[in-house]
Amino acid sequence: CRTGMRINMKIGIRLHDTVSGTLEERLAFVKKQGFECAHLALSKTLPDFAMGDAPEKLSRPEMAETVRSAFDRTGMDCAVLGCYLNLTHPDAEEREKTREIYYAHLAFARKVGAWMVGSETPIHPKSPMMREASRSEEAFRFFLEQLAPVVRRAEEEDVILAIEPVYTHIVSTPERAERML
């Protein structure tokens, strides 16, 4: 690097794409394979974790301690805490529940050493804005309205909310990703 800055890059893996086992067993396995960090999607990695229970479960200090300790004991970092839920449900109550789950993940992230919560931008299958309409300006603006309070909470928690553009989702192009930002 011309400026003399040193770049530190760690290679990680999605933990739910690895062998079955406890959180610590999975972490030990990927550590032996040379990975230094992992993406943790709780509902895909922990058999007794349901996303609907996230607000209550993630507020428990012992839950954070269990996850943090597993990463610490194996010498791994939690690079991303996954929360891939749909913010565009047509029902307002369901959208509010989803936001509460995001808020719980954002608060939990720092407790386990993650600086980032990862997400995507699918459109809800029951939405009248499905398929081609998901690329509409209406769908994009609706998504931004739903995203705004989650972004505010991420800022309050000092956690990055990372949005992964996907070709078949609302944020589907580099141009839409730039507009979202």
Image (spheres, helix red, strand yellow):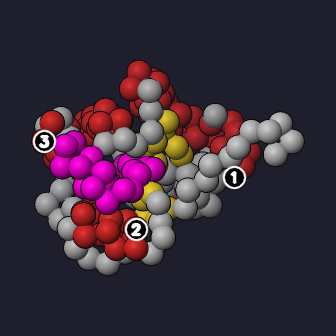
In primary-sequence order, the first of circles 2 and 1 is: 2
Residue pushed farthest bottom? 19
The Cα atoms of the two marked residues, 2 and 3, are separated by 24 Å
Quadrant occupied by the N terminus:
top right
- Under mark 1, the amino acid is Thr
How far from the left and from the top, in percent, is residue 180?
62, 36
10 Å crowding of disc 1: few (<14), some (14-19), many (20+): some
Query: Which type of secondary structure does the marked residue at label 1 adopt?
Result: loop
- Give the tally of numbered discs: 3
Name the residue located 48 percent from the left edge and 70 percent from the top edge: 34
Q: Nearer the viewer, mark 2 or mark 3?
A: 2
The Cα atoms of the two marked residues, 2 and 1, are separated by 34 Å
Name the residue located 32 percent from the left edge and 78 percent from the top edge: 19
The magenta span reads 64-84
Name the residue that disc number 1 marks.
173
How far from the left and from the top, in percent, is residue 57?
15, 43
Name the residue that disc number 2 marks.
31
Name the residue that disc number 3 marks.
62
